Image: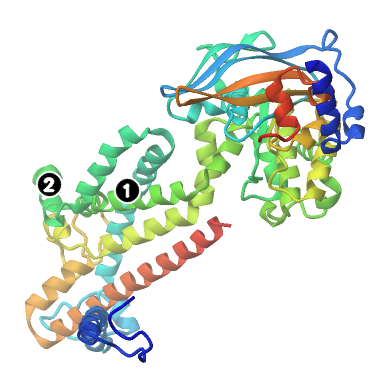
Amino acid sequence: MDESRSETDAERAAPLITPLAIGEQEAVSIETRDVVFDLRDIDVYYGSALALEGVTLEIYKNVITAMIGPSGCGKSTFVRSLNRMNDSIPGFRLTGQALYHGNDIYASSVDPVEVRRRIGMVFQKPNPFPKSIYDNVAWAPRILGMKEGLDERVEKALRGAALWDEVKDRLKRSALGLSGGQQQRLCIARSIAIEPDVLLLDEPASALDPIATALIEDLMQELKRDYTLVIVTHNMQQAARVAERTAFFSLDVSDGKRTGVLVEYDDTAKLFTRPSDKRTEDYVTGRFG
Amino acid sequence: MSAIDDTRPLSASGNLRRRRAVDRTMRSIATGAAIFAVAILVIVIYSIAQRGASQLSIGFLTKNPTTTLNGTGGGIKNAIIGSGLIVALATVIALPLGVLIAIYLTEFSTARLAAPIRLALDLLNGLPSIVIGVFVFGLIVLSSGETGFAGSFALSIIMLPLIARNTAESLSLVPKDLRDASHALGISRWRTTVGIVIPSALSGILTSAVLAIARAAGETAPLLLTTSLFNPNATSINIFGTSLPNIPLDIFNLSESGGAANTAAAWGAALVLMAFILIGSLSARAMLARSRRMMSR
């Protein structure tokens, strides 16, 4: 009885998420994909407050994985933990097993700078350096020792971010003169110029207009061929459009404490049309959020 | 329902008239006090300019004092050179140290470690300059004699907290997301500071240097104790070996020597010093305002 009811609910939810968008994402056959991140029972503390509890999931190579959920449920905290960007936050502590290609990224012998060398991040608000467009892309490779072929590297990165044609004649001009969408693509170019393995994107299009957003989403489909992408988005429809796998986070409010939990993690199509957990179903049908 | 008729005209009623009078009086007094503050500055600048303007000539700036007693036609060239060298050496000592302290405070320390350091800088800033002069006198002059270097050392102690505090403020104005962007590219903290944070805060750092220089150029007490015994008629550049003539002490000596020509020269020197400091302060503030505007894009 329950099952048929939830199916009808999901069908009612279909207008929110166009069937076409979901159909485009083929189901990920996870048996054949390499595991990039293997996370078991991750707890995140800020001081004594438990921010995230018991997160277990695997992230696969060359797949776009989306983290969705209501505000404040820990999705950004989780993704930032993947490349040790939370280290600078006072009181941050992570327990559990966080393996990246089999290596524990929180082991004491690990250099966080090396972690971030391989796992890059693009932020919600575009943050180009106050330098020229060329220098924005070339600065990090130069420091990391990739000094030969810098011009080609910059061009390749800008092409990879679908920005080359727009800026090729003004590479020496300040990056701050670009539009918001262009700045964000520049930030993506900057990240891929050092040839990372994984790209984490924390709400990359939330500060952009719809046209720029569509460009970024198309770009992500291209990027996933060379990189593994993890995106945080508060926009369910965006997750349905771009991601093959989606993780739904939510808040567990008990004893007056708010803790983020991973509710469900599955192929996007299945998560949106036949969610296993009632909380997921409530969220994707818009009953809360 | 009020006891008085609410349809009366809206002119002041009850004790509102008296309260209005009090309000107006207090506002006039406050405005008068503000005008007074500006007036003091204007009076000081005007009186020095008026008395010293007659001395201002190319000769005054490029000739040494005359060797005759109360003679005319001399200049303060050696004092200008001496002051320039002393302040320049003080800057060379204080600027790198101040910037490094600021970098430590904003980039590498925690709030708990930074608090005592900021307190120490504030206390150092508040030390009377004569106390600093006596300290350097005991440290260097007693054993090695008076030198321009001792004066520079004393001035650098005065400049250090100024540079450190203002540079720290400029560095903290650089938005955090620029540092995040650099870290996310696998760049270490120090490289991020050198390559991103400091270039972004550069005009703020230069401004703090200029303000510190303007302050140090006018300090007299430390120089009195460290570089006051010099030959007033000769130009000297041996900063590590002897005392150097300098403008603040020239003003002091000339006004104490008596005689119309000496007094006039003192006013001239005071005008030169005041002009240098005013121009320095104003241009530093203009640079700072411009860089703050550009930072908050």
**Does residue A149 show up?**
no
Q: Quadrant of residue B265?
A: bottom left
Q: Quadrant of residue B184?
A: top right
Where is mark 2, residue-wise? B135
Relative depth, front residue between A56 and B135: A56
| Color encoding of the figure | rainbow
- Residue A147 image label: none
- Residue density around tag 2, few if under 14, some if 14–19, many if 20 or more, within 10 Å: some
Instruction: Give a yes or no on whether discs 1 and 2 share a subunit.
Output: yes
Q: Is residue A135 above or below residue A275?
A: below
- Residue B94 image label: 1
* Residue type, numbered disc 2: Phe
Letter of the chain that mark 2 sits on in the rendering: B
Which residue lies at the image location 37% right of the left edge and 39% below the top edge? B105
Relative depth, front residue between B263 and A3: A3
The picture places residue A40, in percent across and down from the top left corner, at: 62, 10
Quarter of the picture containing the C terminus of chain A is top right
Q: Is residue A41 above or below residue B147?
A: above
Which residue lies at the image location 41% right of the left edge and 59% below the top edge? B207
- Residue density around tag 1, few if under 14, some if 14–19, many if 20 or more, within 10 Å: many
Q: Quadrant of residue A26?
A: top right
Marks 1/2: CA–CA distance: 17 Å
* Residue type, numbered disc 1: Ala
Q: Is residue A277 left or right of residue B101?
A: right
Local secondary structure at mark 2: helix
Which residue lies at the image location 21% right of the left edge and 60% below the top edge? B244
Relative depth, front residue between A218 and A20: A20
